[in-house]
Image (cartoon, coloured by chain):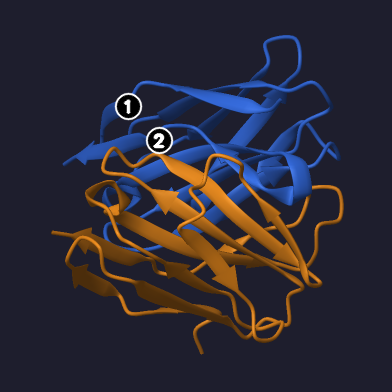
Chain colours: A blue, B orange
């Protein structure tokens, strides 16, 4: 069975500071991992995905994530936070029939 | 043009009623999905539908039934609505179910409130 755990339901960073959102996965097979972002009252938008091609994955809006098998982690980072990054972030792993199993989400607040 | 659209955006109804939520995608995708997001923002897969094959999450009550008139549409029918059905429902689509790597594109969501 596949699952992900997101550590920290709320993360606050200052504008310009490093963003680090944590995700650990559990999978009985090599996982496909995703990060999605949800802005208030909107649907989910894909930030990036890991499909085993490269362990460091670059996504949109300056985000990137590194797949670490030894740590079963897929943490999301951005070197410098912008006010527009404030949103809910979801880590997900692909399971049966391409269905996504999501973590509980991390709300990112950016302080001016 | 909106890739995945849902109607209505908001739906308020009484317990016991039957309601439907419509979803349409104009991406030419083969697979569509329904997810439920509860009040704590937790997202859970309900159904996936690919080439007339329906895969159901076994935890979904049989009051919920997806209907697909064609490849571009996957509607969600809910019978005998209960208070616990209040949530945001998201439709999504992907090119196929090719081993799990396909990006899913989400609709804007339908906020269902059951009174």
Mark 1, other Cα within 10 Å: few <14 / some 14–19 / many ≥20: some
Q: Is B12 on the left or on the right of B63, as rendered?
A: left
- Check residue A28 in the rendering and tell me which mark sits there, or answer none: none
Vertical order, A99 against B31 (above or below):
above
Residue drawn at x 22%, y 50% as measured from the top left: B83
The picture places residue A47, in percent across and down from the top left corner, at 55, 51
* Number of numbered discs overlaid on the protein picture: 2
Residue drawn at x 45%, y 58% as measured from the top left: B63
Query: Between B98 and B49, which is closer to the camera in this rendering?
Result: B49
Q: Which chain carries label 1?
A: A
Residue drawn at x 60%, y 81% as measured from the top left: B73
Choose the circle earlier in sequence order: 1 or 2. 1
For the residues tagged 1 and 2, is the chain the same?
A: yes
Vertical order, B48 against B70 (above or below):
above
Tell me the SS state at disc 1: loop
Location of mark 2 (residue): A105
The picture places residue B50, in percent across and down from the top left corner, at 77, 66
The picture places residue A105, in percent across and down from the top left corner, at 40, 35
Tell me the SS state at disc 2: loop
Vertical order, B56 against A57 (above or below):
below
Give the image quarter of residue A104.
top left
Q: How far apart are marks 1 and 2 (CA)?
A: 6 Å
Query: Between B15 and A64, which is closer to the camera in this rendering?
Result: B15
Q: Quadrant of the C terminus of chain B?
A: bottom left
* Proximity of marks 1 and 2: CB atoms separated by less than 8 Å: yes
Residue extending farthest to the top is A70
Location of mark 1 (residue): A9
Residue drawn at x 68%, y 28% as measured from the top left: A2
């Amino acid at each position: 069975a596949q699952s992900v755990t997101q550590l920290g339901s709320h993360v606050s960073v200052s504008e310009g500071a490093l963003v680090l959102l944590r995700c650990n996965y559990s999978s009985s097979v090599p996982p496909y991992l995703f990060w999605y972002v949800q802005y208030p009252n909107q649907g989910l938008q894909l930030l990036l995905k890991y499909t085993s091609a490269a362990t460091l994955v670059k996504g949109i809006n300056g985000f990137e994530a590194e797949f670490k098998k030894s740590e079963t982690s897929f943490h999301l980072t951005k070197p410098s936070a912008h006010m527009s990054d404030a949103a809910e972030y979801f880590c997900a792993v692909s399971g049966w029939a391409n269905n996504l199993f999501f973590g509980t989400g991390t709300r990112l607040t950016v302080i001016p | 043009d909106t890739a995945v659209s849902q109607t209505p955006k908001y739906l308020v109804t009484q317990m016991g009623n039957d309601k439907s939520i419509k979803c349409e995608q104009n991406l030419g995708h083969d697979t569509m999905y329904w997810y439920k997001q509860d009040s704590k923002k937790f997202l859970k897969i309900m159904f996936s539908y690919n080439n007339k094959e329906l895969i159901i999450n076994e935890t979904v009550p049989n009051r919920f039934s997806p209907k697909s008139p064609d490849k571009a549409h996957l509607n969600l029918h809910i019978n005998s609505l209960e208070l616990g059905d209040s949530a945001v429902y998201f439709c999504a689509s992907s090119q196929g179910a090719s081993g799990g790597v396909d990006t899913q594109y989400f609709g804007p969501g339908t906020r269902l409130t059951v009174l």
